[in-house]
Image (cartoon, rainbow, N blue to C red):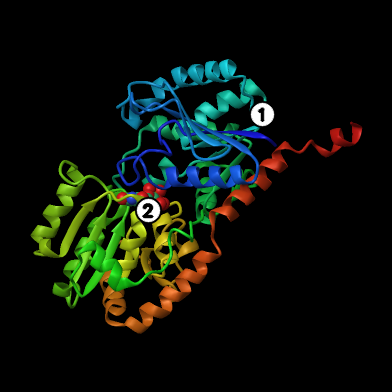
Amino acid sequence: MERIAFISVHGCPTAKLGSKDTGGMSVYIRQVAREMAERGVYVDIYTRYHDPNDPQVVSLGERARVIHIPGGPYDDMKESLPRHLPEFVCSLLAYTVREGLSYDLIHSHYWLSGRVGTLLARHWGIPHVTTFHTLAEIKRHARAGEQEPEARVVGERKVIASVDRIVASSQHEKEAMVRLYNARGHKIEVIPCGVDVELFRPMNQRLARRSLGVRDPKVVLFVGRIEPLKGVDILIRAMAQLEQRDSVRALIVGGEPGGDPEIRRLEAMASELGISSQVSFLGRVEQEQLPTYYNAADVCVVPSYYESFGLVALEAMACGTPVIASRVGGLPTVVKGGVTGYLIPWRCPEPFADGLDVLLKSPAIRRAMGRASRRLALGMRWSDTAEQMLALYQLLLAPPLASAAAG
Ligand code: UDP
């Protein structure tokens, strides 16, 4: 196996993390591609041009690069992308012909890319692996009221029927695909995500707080894209119920304060509950700076209604910070209830407030959980993810036994 094509039509691995459509998937693609490249495989990541100033090719280091391909107007929303997919496919094919590129296998990310991957894999006669990252039906079941276009569900079903293998990030995601999409279990491989344990590592909490200018005695942290599925509303309501709420600050990292209606809604909620002065909406933060935030925090809260994996929980744990998370999707793969934090089975603020009260009051429990968290994170690295994926690719590329014997 020499050269792999990753397809990520809507999420550019070089885009700013923490804004609307750029989060865990971009991190996943970038990290796995780099790890594969380090193991001698060339990885080309195809994405659409998001900005007229994007250079066509961006290197991610030796053997891994991002290639921008025309695919609709730069600022088009993800929802209108399906109609630009034919342009993307044609431009991508023309590019590969011009550059004399051929691939051994395609790995697509998200259903839009899965549709592209299906066409290309058929055209080139090579295997196609997909990672959905999120699926419409699973989101819909997780949070009543979450509207996903029917075209997406139809598209996802087509991808599931056509791919050679699906990579799920957790057993929960695999089971949900079988239950909600009638996917065949043997086609789904569970490969957990990883974390960069060099970047995300424990550091002195006092120094971390000082460098952020945080003076409050206790700090609770949320990190992620700001959208209803992330459950920031649960955290804000929980904050209002804390026993010593006046000495606790919630740092909310992610999104773009100023115009985002979801942030405005959450700010209004904090104001109504009388805790505006205790909640700081900080906007998105470069990933290289995030370890300071995780280390400044006493507890990281992941109150999501659904999470296919939950990289933020693992990053906090790698920094030695306990996590209180909803018991949904892939989060139980990462957070071990009572050992590295708490898993909350209900999507309501009271049990989150209870967990926070316990942890904020007990430095000894926080320390013990922090140490267990770091230990667990050390066993979940991106190198493990990439190696499992390469093993899967090898399996798909190996000649069937009968023809190997005949040859
Ligand atoms: N992230 C970041 N800056 C931010 C907010 C998020 O770098 O301001 C990164 C974070 O470190 C994590 C990813 O975005 O790696 C979010 O991944 P997660 O799996 O938690 O959520 P998703 O975006 O996949 O829903």
Q: Is residue 134 visible in the rendered structure shown here?
A: no
Disc 1 packing (10 Å; few <14; some 14–19; many ≥20): some
Residue picked out by circle 2:
288
Q: Is residue 262 left or right of residue 129?
A: left
Residue 71 x %, y %: 41, 22
- Where residue 109 appears, as percent x and y from the top left, is 49, 38
Task: Decide if residue 149 is in sight here.
Answer: yes
Looking at the image, residue 84 lies above or below residue 236 = above
Label 2 vs 1, first from the N-terminus: 1
Q: Nearer the viewer, residue 95 or 329?
A: 95
Quadrant location, the N terminus: top right
Residue 295 placement: quadrant: bottom left
Q: Give residue 319's mark.
A: none
Q: CA distance from mark 2 to mark 1?
A: 37 Å
**Element type where label 1 sits in the image:** loop
Residue 157, given in percent of the width and then of the height, sits at 51, 34
Name the residue beneath numbered marker 1.
Answer: 126
Q: Nearer the viewer, residue 252 or 205?
A: 205
Q: Quadrant of the C terminus?
A: top right
**What residue sits 25% from the left and 71% below the top?**
353
| Residue drawn where x is 50% and y is 65% of the image | 377
| Residue at left offset 58%, top offset 37% | 63
Q: Is mark 2 within 8 Å of ligand 1?
A: no
Residue sitting at x 15%, y 44%: 258
Give the amino acid type for the residue marked by disc 1 in the picture. Ile
Kindly indicate the quadrant of the structure image that contains residue 328. bottom left
